[in-house]
Amino acid sequence: MSSASKMAGILPLLGLLACSQLTAQPVRFAQLNDPALLKSPRRQTPSEWLEAQYALACAVEVINRSVRSGKKLDFIVITGGFGLKDGDPASVAQLIPERVRALSAAMVPAVYVLPGEDDLEATGGIDNKSYEDFVSHLKQALQDKDVRDLATDSPAVLGIQIVGLNSASFGNDGGKLAQSNREAELREMDRLRRATAGRPSIVFVPVPDLDDPTLLKLGKSAAGSWHIDDTVRLAWNGLLDQSEILAVFSGHLRSSTRGVYSRDYSWTLNQPGPAAALKTWVCPPLTAPSARPEPFLRGFCIGTVAHSGEVSVATNWFPPAVGTEPADKNDKLAEGNAYEKDKDYDRASAAYQQALSSNDDWIRGQAESRFERAVKLAKDRTWEGTLLAQFWLRWWRDILIGCLLAVLLLLASRFDVLRRLLKVKAVRTMIGTPEITITPPQKGNEGAAVDEFTVQLTLALEDIQSALGPDRGWQILAAGDSKVSAPGTGEGLPELKIGGVDIKTVLAWLAAIRNLLRRRIEIQVWGASARTQAYAVQRLGWIEEAHWATPPPGSSADVVEAAQQLAYCIMGQEYIR
Amino acid sequence: MTPELAGNLESRGVKGNFKFTDTASFRLFVEGMKGLRTYEQSAELEGLRTAETKLTKCVAQYPRDILPQFYLGVVKVFRGYDGVGDAVRVFGTIARDVPELRAPAMYNLASAYIERYTPESLDLARDWLKKCIAEVGEDKSVDRLTLRFQAEVVLLFYEIRQRLWVKRDNPQDALKAEVDHIVPDLDRKLNEFLEKLNATSKIPAAARADIMADYWNDRGLLDEFRAWSVPGENEKRALARTSIQSYEESLKWKLNWIPSKSNMARVNIDLLDDFVSADKCLQEVEHARPGDDYAAYLWGRLNEKTGDSAAATSYYEKAIHIPEAKKNLARLYEKDRREDAIGVWSKILAKHPDDKDALAAQARLSFPTPTPASGAQPKV
């Protein structure tokens, strides 16, 4: 086989490869809306007129700069807002060549247009002679460009279908025309469906299916930009769900908030569905009415859409200052300032030191003076620089909260809040019956009848509890809010070691902690069997709630009587005024 | 005994919010309650004495504590006729002044009036039981439901006693309406009551035992009337034995319960002529409540039947406030103490001018039937 024949075999493959590389390239475009090209000067303030004159030129200048830097653009799309409704139809033919001269200078091969709400009469449906004339004149004025009306045409660019949805009528005069326009709008949806079927597509929609920020005050139902019939919305939602539609680019919305143009829908009253939220991008207007205390944001977008559906959009804001980056090392200046306010002069100095290398003169100047000040302040540390003071300054809130909690605990203890709380049925149900544990009585002296005392105390407690039990079916007497458990002989902890760890010790610690957090009564028994004196203290944590001496000072009792008296004191505390 | 109670209403803690002045008051109360429980569980008189002593001391030393007063009232009811006056006063005050204890106080007030055992006091008991049931209403709490059952079963006792039992010694042909209509009606009511009680699982066991004892006592009373109302001796004795069985069933639920014991003694005396069993029953009543008036009345009946008029007179004199005892006493007096008999009958008539027995006795005593000896012509 000759080399020529070899080449003949390879060339179609190379062609295919080139073609596939071509089609794999993302589409890059500039989206403009609201250029107000044909708006009558009589309907504009002087500044609006000036803005309209130069906004398009500025946008084209930015586009051309981008192209010159090597970032080719495939087309410019203008999604409505030409001002046809506010213009003079008779003078369109004369005005267009002059007004679109900037467009003719754009280093872009194609210009696509779509009518917006300001370009068509909603009452007239989507067919409008003025707009068609405008497109016709535009084609004549931009003969070197591929001018298309996306309302009727759906060109393919780099394998991606560029489709327009003529949503100019979708406002339907606040819904009044939803029924009469339904058929036409359904036809428009059908056209969109056919145009996008089976092909990756980008859809341009002049008026988005989102709330109009300027109408939010009117309430949820009036805030929406679209007031279409349910069948039309169903068709639109169905289209949005199709994977072929890679992205939806809109305009029309005017706002002073960047969030409106950054896919943050928290401001909306009618939250968009997941598909709409994911695919919709909103471009700011090129021009906007200026008679407002807070001016509307202006700008245009340069978008890139890949076949994979990956979308990136860069917004160019007007005037350029709005979108400019902050001065170099400005963040270091702010960081140093924050540390300085926190009296952390070392870190402040370090931040200011970094800002000294800024390429911005003002930042450098500021950093220099502040660095000197921070160094000086660091040297001249007063009492605030001491460790104790720093500790206080760092932790004073926490210490204050801790003290406050301690005071609250003391007050709660003083006014018996816990016990009052336990009387609330819901609380009692939640935490169960509180238990008073009587710890095994301790000997106060050698020979104290502690064992007999323990037995007698247990018997007396049981005796009282049974006497106060349910009586003849009338629960006049309850056995108290707390459950008193008789004195035990200690915890039966297992002798166990796991991996050298004495489990008994660990359990003993845990039991001690648990007991500490319980209400408990500690008893000490003095004397002998014939003459006994018992002292008991009831504690909750470290707080001493009550204490008793039985028999009371000045009297004497044997071990039985002393134990019984204590039992009545313990059980009686819930029954005594 | 009962001071102004309203001042203690702010106390809290115990259900119904009634706390004690100090540990000593609490201790006296608990010791009193222990005595009361001992008496309720074993019918040991010592328990009742302890309860009365401790609670009386508690009430005397701590007049602002309400619960000791309430339970002292309960003790007084157990004491029988002697304590009824005190019990009525304390429960009357509590029913008026202490809303939380109103319903139980009303029930106990009714119990106290029943202990007095006069037609007037029984009517008062019925009124208080009805008030108690109204006070309880449709409350489904355990306490209230229990109290409702307790009141209802005592009210049934009242109905059986007043509509049937009091007429037991009327001529049998005059009891047709009672036998044909009232007996089946009350029998149905008792059955319905038992069904309702069995369908309620919430009643505590101790209270259920009390109610069941009352229920079987009611049954015994109904059977006793039926025994009175049948003409045949065999049938009468069979029904009397059924009545005894009901009273025995009642005593299974409540050991040595005085009303059932007394009723059993009465059936043995009046219907079965079983004086030995009657004597045994009355001995047990005497043990549980020495000097019980109704027991004295029954002793009188027993002695009268066995021909010991002197002993009978002595017992009737002890139970003089029981209308039947008073009449029997007057009849016995007629034999050899005519003036005393006239005096007793006059007292009865003064209180109940329409009392047929008293009117007949008055006529009998005013115009004595001449004896053959007195009617004979004097020999010349």
Image (cartoon, rainbow, N blue to C red):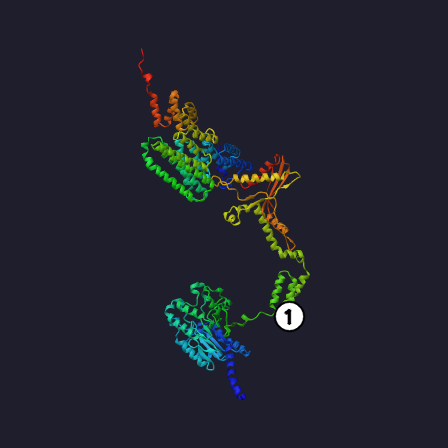
Say left or right for B196 vs A283: left
Q: Position of residue B347 (x, y in %)?
A: 38, 25
Q: Residue at x 49, y 64 (%)?
A: A266
How would you rate the neighbour count of disc 1 (Cα within 10 Å): few for under 14, some for 14-19, many for 20 or more?
some
Q: Position of residue A305 (x, y in %)?
A: 50, 74
The image quadrant of residue B369 is: top left
Residue matched to label 1: A357
Q: Position of residue B30 (x, y in %)?
A: 53, 37
The image quadrant of residue A551 is: top right
Q: Residue at x 38, y 21 (%)?
A: B335
Is A194 drawn above or below residue B115 in the view shown? below
> Please, which residue is most extreme toward the front here?
B234
Is A536 drawn above or below residue A246 in the view shown? above
The image quadrant of residue A117 is: bottom left
Quarter of the picture containing the C terminus of chain A is top right
Q: Secondary structure at mark 1?
A: loop
Please name the amino acid that badge 1 sits on.
Ser
Label 1 marks a residue whose chain is: A
Query: Which one is in front, B352 or A317?
Result: B352
Is B118 drawn above or below residue A14 in the view shown? above
Q: Position of residue B164 (x, y in %)?
A: 36, 34
Query: Which one is in front, B157 or B64?
Result: B157
Residue B136 can be seen in this image: yes
Residue B106 can be seen in this image: no
> Please, which residue is most extreme toward the right here?
A379
Query: Which one is in front, B105 or A313?
Result: B105
